[in-house]
Amino acid sequence: MQFVYEAMSADGRTLCDRLEAGDHAAAASSLRERGLVVLRLEAAGEAEADGQAGLARSWLQRFGNKLTTRDLVLLTRQMKMLLEAGAPLVPALEATEEQTAKPFVRAIIRRLRERVEEGDSLCKALEAEGPIFDPVFRGMVAAGEATASLPQVFGRLCELAQLQLKTRKLVTGALLYPAILSVLLAVVVCVLLFFVVPRFKVLFVSMNSPLPALTEFLFGASEFATENWPYLAGALVALIVGVVLCFRLPQPRRWVDEVLLRVPLIGRLMSRLIFARVVRIWAAMLRCHVPLLEAIRQSREAVTNAAFLRLIAQVEESVSSGGRMGHALAAARIADPVIVSAIKTGEDNGRLAEATDFVSTWLDEDNANAVQHVTRLAEPAMLAVMGVVVGFVAMALFVPLFDLAGMAG
């Protein structure tokens, strides 16, 4: 039997290939014997069928309509309310479909309802939608169906989506003001170099008076920008393309992710935000009776940072080999020692779900304070940079004017 796999080697390279094995367990064992950390492993026929079935929806989701986090909040909240009120699954889906305003989301719910009416489980109906519903969502629904706890599962999915939306708003709000100041600074510099400084240069040249070195430097910068603006614009476009490629191509992306996590203050905050999301998923899935190893495996879908993804893969490898989660986290150095100790204690007492739930809540509150702290530091720093730039230009332009006025007097 042929399998398609994606695995990570000891040196951090991601490998994608095929192998022959008797079954899924034998294929996974073969890869581990070669020193590889398995990221994805599935039968070749299933992988190709899933890829073809989900291709159109993937392109539609990327370039057309998209199921947003807000849509997930509304969907899960409605399903939780209806199922807790005692409604069967199909009528609950039908009522949710009728109450949904967006045609794209309503079409998704209609397809789910039709498949369930035809005898499929809700989990299989979700899988048929391809990448629209991530593996975490599908895994928790599958656990809810297996344990007859779908209302509670949809409640936890709603909480998960709400926390994700809250974190996204927090980070976006923190970045918004510095981004606006950066754009204003760029506009001010362009206006000064291309419009204001050239007019002062004409004035000073007509007076034929000696200029300070600061003014000469400013005139030289303005002249260079005015004469070479097409090349500067091209360099800016090339820089933007290079940054995009660094985040798209695997090897540059891995290097960028490693660097970002090592940046003072920002790297630590980014690491804590990513880990908080991962622990939140672990807590939600464990409370829905999803096995620990499956919860760790599915949480990789919520991570895009390549360096952090490798750390989670190491934790999964350790737990799958019979190790303890707390020791694996400590070895991978993902979290602070106090967090690792809390998870170890919960694991030792058989209350890992409660421990991860407590840790995720604590991390969310602590991260919110940290983001606000970074924002408070960034705002005066950006204002100081703007002040320095404007002050430099003012000194370079007005000092010669004062000298001329003094000579005239």
Image: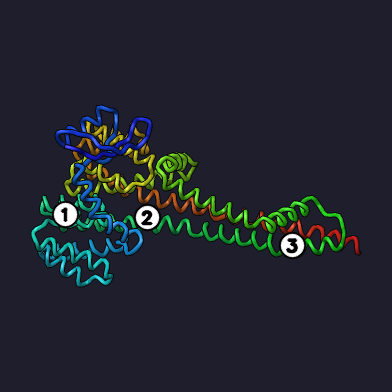
Sequence-wise, the earlier of marks 2 and 1 is: 1
- The residue mark sitting in front, 2 or 3, is 3
The image shows residue 164 at horizontal and vertical percentages of 33, 55
354 over 128 or under it: above or below: above
Please tell me in which quadrant of the rendered image residue 209 appears: bottom right
Alpha-carbon neighbours of circle 3 within 10 Å: few (<14), some, or many (≥20)? some
Reading the image, the residue beneath label 1 is 123
Sequence-wise, the earlier of marks 2 and 3 is: 2
Residue 380 or residue 127, whichever sits in front: 127
Reading the image, the residue beneath label 3 is 198
| Circles 1 and 3 in contact, beta carbons < 8 Å | no
The image shows residue 356 at horizontal and vertical percentages of 27, 44
| Circles 2 and 3 in contact, beta carbons < 8 Å | no
Please tell me in which quadrant of the rendered image residue 311 appears: top left
The image shows residue 384 at horizontal and vertical percentages of 62, 54
Q: Is mark 2 on a helix, strand or loop?
A: helix
* Residue pictured at 72% horizontal, 56% vertical: 223
Please tell me in which quadrant of the rendered image residue 309 appears: top left
Q: In this view, does 295 lie to the left or right of 190?
A: left
The image shows residue 213 at horizontal and vertical percentages of 79, 50
The three-letter code of the residue at mark 2 reads: Thr
The label shown at residue 167 is 2
